[in-house]
Amino acid sequence: MQVNNLEVSRRSLLKWGGAVAGGAALVGTAAGAVDSPAQADGMQGVDKTVWSACLVNCGSRCPLRLQVKDGIVVRVLPDNSGTNELGSQQIRACPRGRTARQRIYNPDRLKKPMRRKPGTKRGDGQWETSTEMKPSISTTTRVSRAAISPRQAHSNGC
């Protein structure tokens, strides 16, 4: 192949393409690099940083640091208390766990107990606010709970 009186071989094209791609990758990683330890520790100008746990029903309960400003969570950060020594590793929450802020402020989040309206079928999507704080437990559940010992009921470590 000839471009502007220059002979371009397949090999030279691949070499230059690899060099350009490598340079672009280096520039991309340098743009996201942390400039100072203060940036690695979170945002500047927050009121406080509180500890919480990831509660997305996976059972791990990974620790999270929540940065709060004016009573609103503005950033979710991973654990930074451990070292990389055996027995003291940092526990990093997964991406699903780090979406705690989106779950807290989701407009569709339930804020009051709800129950299906009397006389409606399941799946109709008709709900009313419930004044009961606890859901009703069926008779069969009460019987089965009474049939086992308290030790058996809490054998999962809770």
Image (cartoon, rainbow, N blue to C red):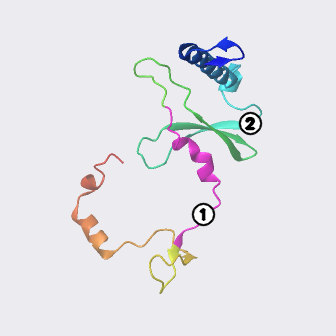
Helix, strand or loop at mark 1: loop
Indicate the amino acid at tag 1. Answer: Lys
Look at the image and say whether residue 61 sits in the magenta stretch.
no
Dividing the picture into quadrants, the one containing residue 36 is top right
| Residue 19 vs residue 79, the one in the foreground | 19
Residue 145 locus on image (x, y percent): 28, 65
| Residue 59 vs residue 23, the one in the foreground | 23
Disc 1: which residue? 111
Q: Is residue 51 above or below residue 13?
A: below
Q: Is residue 75 visible?
A: yes
Residue 21 locus on image (x, y percent): 61, 21
The residue stretch that appears in magenta = 92-114
Q: Residues within 10 Å of mark 2 (few under 14, many from 20)?
A: some
**In this picture, residue 18 sits left or right of residue 46:** left
- Residue at x-position 50% and y-position 38%: 94
Look at the magenta stretch and give its main secondary structure: loop
| Residue 125 vs residue 144, the one in the foreground | 125
Residue 95 locus on image (x, y percent): 53, 40
- Badge 2 or badge 1: first in the primary sequence: 2
Disc 2: which residue? 46
**Total label count?**
2
Q: Are marks 2 and 1 in contact (CB under 8 Å)?
A: no
